[in-house]
Image: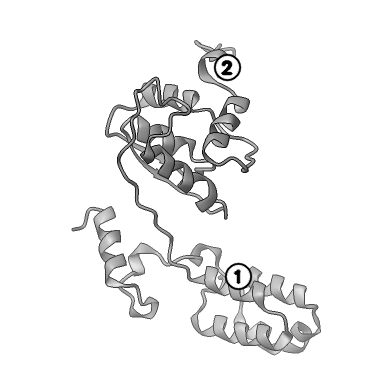
């Protein structure tokens, strides 16, 4: 970029700041502390510049749910993605209150009166299920059983030769429980934590028909 100077500067008086964003969160979830929320006014300005009504907003890191809340109030479609365990406590709760007509953030400036809906979905787990089992295991025997399950049904990293582990099972047994857990998690293919869309017809995953239909609707195949 060299010495190119920015054409505009957005001051907090116009676009908000983190303190304002935290106050917006407190209005919907009083006891929740979020370290880096974005104010609704900031997202409103960005969405107004880059989109129009019914456009799709995609946020891979939805965090406190500001993007969804603002998109909803501005009559945009949106997809929010989050893997942290506060998704029900904060972004989901926030969107429900937006639908109920909460009057924080940009609500008054866009004359928000509530309404609309959203669909909440979770990815079907594959290797992520195995990681859950590993983390809950407390004995060497249970971890060895999980290893045999991984051999049969889990996706193992291409860097790992399962026979090497079987041939050195005594070394595995000599590890501490935590070391065993770390090893088993490390050998799993992290690209296979969840079932891929291309595999939903695979009978081994036992995907319910309603879930298949929802996925196909999402991708415009029905």
What residue do we see at 40% from left, 22% from top? 108
58 lies left or right of 192: left
Picture quadrant of residue 161? bottom right
Dot 1 alpha-carbon crowd within 10 angstroms: few under 14, some 14 to 19, many 20 or more: few
Picture quadrant of residue 38? top right
Quadrant location of the N terminus? top right
Q: How many marks?
A: 2
The vertical placement of 130 against 166, above or below, is: above
What residue do we see at 55% from left, 68% from top? 189
The vertical placement of 23 against 179, above or below, is: above
Quadrant location of the C terminus? bottom left
Residue 91 position within the rendered picture, expressed as x and y whole percent measured from the top left:
49, 45
What residue do we see at 43% from left, 29% from top? 103
Q: Which residue is mark 1?
A: 159
Viewer can see residue 11: no
Most extreme residue toward the left, as rendered?
Answer: 222
205 lies left or right of 30: left
25 lies left or right of 177: left
Residue 18 position within the rendered picture, expressed as x and y whole percent measured from the top left:
61, 27
Q: Earlier in the sequence, mark 2 or mark 1?
A: 2
Residue 50 position within the rendered picture, expressed as x and y whole percent measured from the top left:
37, 25
Q: Which residue is mark 2?
A: 12
Q: Secondary structure at mark 1?
A: loop
Dot 2 alpha-carbon crowd within 10 angstroms: few under 14, some 14 to 19, many 20 or more: few
């Amino acid at each position: 970029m060299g010495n190119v100077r920015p054409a505009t500067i957005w001051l907090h008086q116009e676009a908000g700041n983190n303190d304002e964003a935290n106050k917006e969160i407190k209005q919907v979830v009083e006891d929740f502390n979020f370290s880096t929320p974005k104010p609704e006014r900031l997202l409103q300005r960005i969405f107004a510049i880059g989109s129009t009504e019914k456009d799709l907003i995609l946020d891979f890191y939805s965090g406190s749910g500001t993007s969804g809340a603002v998109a909803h109030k501005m009559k945009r479609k949106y997809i929010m993605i989050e893997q942290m365990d506060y998704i029900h406590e904060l972004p989901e709760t926030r969107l429900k209150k937006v639908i109920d007509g909460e009057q924080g953030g940009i609500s008054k400036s866009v004359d928000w009166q509530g309404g609309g809906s959203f669909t909440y979905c979770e990815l079907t787990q594959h290797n992520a299920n195995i990681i859950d089992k590993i983390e809950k295991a407390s004995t060497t025997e249970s971890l060895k059983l999980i290893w045999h399950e991984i051999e049969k049904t889990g996706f193992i990293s291409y860097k790992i030769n399962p026979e090497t582990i079987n041939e050195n099972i005594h070394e595995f047994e000599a590890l501490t429980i935590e070391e065993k857990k770390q090893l088993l998690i490390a050998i799993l293919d992290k690209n296979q934590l969840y079932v891929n869309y291309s595999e939903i017809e695979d009978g081994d995953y036992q995907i319910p028909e309603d879930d298949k239909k929802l996925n196909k609707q999402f991708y415009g195949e029905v």
